[in-house]
Image: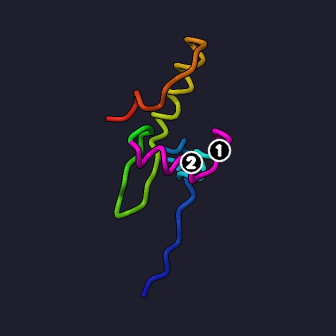
Amino acid sequence: MRKFSPQVVTAAPKFYSVAQVAAMFGMSPMTLYRAIAAGEFPAVRIRGRLIVPAKAVDAMADTATAEQTVVDAAGWVV
């Protein structure tokens, strides 16, 4: 059996883990999991694992900064 060896990625990530995004936003991962389950936060499920698109996080931050307002993450959910 081959051992998995992750490759080092130097480019900006395309996805973040739920734990990474929760840490960025200063909240618990469980709060973010609940928001995702309620359809209030964008995420992608791949074989049971949830990941958050970096573009969605960046777009929310850019909009909040540009408009100097509160951004509702539910607006980024399809």
Tell me the crowding category of disc 2: few under 14, some 14 to 19, or many 20 or more residues within 10 angstroms, Cα based.
few
Q: Nearer the viewer, residue 64 or 13?
A: 64
Residue, x 53% and y 51% (percent of image)? 18
Q: On the rendered image, what quadrant is the C terminus found in?
A: top left
The location of residue 77, given as percent across then percent down, is 37, 35
Residue, x 49% and y 75% (percent of image)? 4
- Count of marks placed on residues: 2
Residue, x 45% and y 51% (percent of image)? 51
Q: Which residue is mark 1?
A: 27
The location of residue 55, given as percent across then percent down, is 46, 34
Mark 2–mark 1 Cα distance, whole angstroms, equals: 7 Å
Q: Nearer the viewer, residue 48 or 8?
A: 48
Task: Tell me which amino acid carries mark 2.
Answer: Thr
The reply, left or right, for residue 5 in relation to residue 40 is right
Residue, x 43% and y 55% (percent of image)? 50
Q: Which residue is mark 2?
A: 31
Magenta residues, as a range? 23-38
Q: Looking at the image, is 16 positioned above or below residue 60?
A: below
The reply, left or right, for residue 1 in relation to residue 58 is left
Q: Indicate the quadrant where residue 46 lies.
A: bottom left
